[in-house]
Image (tube, grey):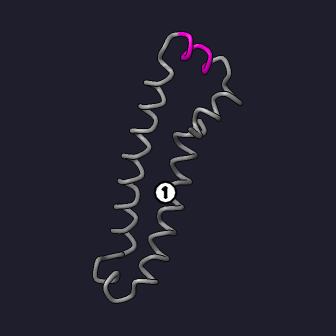
Amino acid sequence: MRHLDYMKQHHKSTYNRLSFEGKLNSHLYDINTKAEEMFSELVNQMKTNEGITEQLKIDNQLEWVRRMNNIRHRATEIINHELIYT
């Protein structure tokens, strides 16, 4: 939905073209699919790089949640920059 709103505001011609051609929903579906895959990959890579393990989750749940939330926020920002708002 963020990409749709962005297109309506900043890329009206592309939005109108895709809408008239009946390709808007498939375009949005593709963006959503790519974003979900990219999010999963980024989170897993960042977890590995930062040494976040299931053992940390068992030993210190608050620290695990804090670090995972940080990773999720960073991954979301990357996806917004590379997919959603382009």
- Considering only vertical position in the picture, is 38 above or below 44? above
Identity of the residue drawn at 47% across and 65% down: 71
For numbered disc 1, what is the local secondary structure? helix
The image quadrant of residue 33 is top left
**Residues rendered magenta in the picture:** 14-20
Task: Provide residue 11's location: percent of width, then percent of height.
Answer: 66, 25
Question: In the image shown, does 43 or 69 lie closer to the viewer?
Answer: 69
- Considering only vertical position in the picture, is 40 above or below 67? above
Identity of the residue drawn at 56% across and 16% down: 19
The residue indicated by pointer 1 is: 75
On screen, residue 31 versus residue 45, left or right, reads right
Q: Is residue 15 magenta?
A: yes
- Considering only vertical position in the picture, is 24 above or below 75? above
Q: Is residue 56 magenta?
A: no
Amino acid found under the numbered disc labelled 1: Ala
Q: Residues within 10 Å of mark 1 (few under 14, many from 20)?
A: many
Identity of the residue drawn at 40% across and 60% down: 43
Q: Quadrant of the N terminus?
A: top right
Task: Provide residue 62's location: percent of width, then percent of height.
Answer: 45, 83
Task: Provide residue 66's location: percent of width, then percent of height.
Answer: 49, 77
Q: Quadrant of the C terminus?
A: top right
